[in-house]
Image (spheres, grey):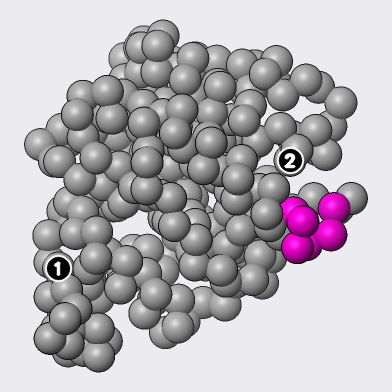
């Protein structure tokens, strides 16, 4: 992965999306003094079957903020699009473009936008992940074009931002690059995922920390087998 950058913005659909793949890399980057901010398109209100959406949104947003703090992320913003039915198109691109222009990152991070997941080409990805991932790739260019969403560029608004140099897609079945992760970063990623306690408890009977440890160590070991023998977080990297 490239290392000559200072600021990143991670854009995903739901609370927990980053904790299921990118969190260990984020911990490595923040430990090295880089700035990473999170942008959540929804509050995950449709994610817990046993909890009303209003309560789920409150619980999951709080879990996301606590989770982000564990890997050194202080800025967490929610766009409040509707969970489960995120609409692709100009409206979503407009919101993402505004965020990119405000944060001015060199690196964008998102989650798998492909139809299937990395670990098995027959596991179908969800509409929200596909829509948001593709919109992030589009908004990376939109942000630098002053004639796209020019209403955002008023006297008091940010200017165009053509400084996004890469978009890194976690969980992609077409990974091209990887960020090596050490034991401290891996432990922080495990704690970060386990912080989504209400969500993970609703998913199954396994205790959240045990579940998070098994998931992250398995993913890191499988990635090591593909990327030079070191535990790592793989990404599909698009260069701009």
Which residue is the site of mark 2? Answer: 199
Residue 131: where, in percent of width, then height? 52, 67
For marks 2 and 1, give the CA distance: 36 Å
- Residue sitting at x 78%, y 62%: 53
Residue 115 visible in the shown view? no
Q: Is residue 27 left or right of residue 119?
A: left
Residues rendered magenta in the picture: 51-56
Which residue is the site of mark 1? Answer: 161
Front-lying residue, 159 or 10:
159
Q: Is residue 217 left or right of residue 139?
A: right
User: Quadrant location of the C terminus?
Assistant: bottom left
197 to 90, vertically: above or below: above
Q: Secondary structure at mark 2?
A: helix
Residue 37: where, in percent of width, then height? 34, 47
Residue 218: where, in percent of width, then height? 58, 17
- Residue sitting at x 53%, y 36%: 66
Residue 30's label in the rendered image is none
Q: Main secondary structure of the magenta part?
A: helix
Residue 32 visible in the shown view? yes
User: Quadrant location of the N terminus?
Assistant: top left
How busy is the neighbourhood of tag 1: few (under 14 within 10 Å), some, or many (20 plus)?
Answer: many
Front-lying residue, 228 or 216:
216
């Amino acid at each position: 992965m490239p290392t000559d950058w200072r600021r990143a913005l991670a854009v995903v659909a739901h609370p927990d999306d980053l904790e299921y793949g990118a969190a260990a890399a984020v911990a490595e980057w923040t430990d090295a003094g880089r700035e990473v901010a999170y942008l959540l398109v929804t509050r995950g209100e449709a994610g817990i079957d046993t909890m009303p959406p209003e309560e789920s949104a409150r619980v999951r947003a709080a879990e996301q903020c606590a989770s982000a703090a564990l890997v050194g992320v202080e800025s967490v913003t929610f766009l409040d699009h509707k969970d489960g039915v995120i609409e692709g198109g100009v409206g979503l691109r407009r919101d993402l473009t505004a965020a990119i222009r405000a944060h001015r990152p060199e690196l964008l991070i998102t989650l798998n936008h492909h139809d299937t997941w990395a670990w098995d080409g027959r596991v179908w990805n969800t509409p929200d992940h596909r829509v948001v991932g593709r919109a992030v790739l589009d908004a990376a260019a939109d942000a630098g074009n002053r004639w796209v969403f020019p209403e955002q560029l008023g006297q008091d608004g940010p200017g165009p931002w053509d400084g996004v140099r890469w978009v890194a897609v976690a969980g992609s079945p077409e990974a091209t690059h990887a960020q090596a992760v050490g034991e401290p970063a891996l432990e922080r990623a495990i704690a970060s995922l386990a912080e989504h306690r209400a969500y993970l408890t609703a998913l199954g009977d396994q205790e959240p920390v045990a579940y998070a440890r098994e998931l992250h160590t398995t993913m890191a070991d499988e990635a090591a087998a593909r990327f030079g023998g070191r535990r790592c977080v793989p990404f599909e990297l698009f260069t701009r």
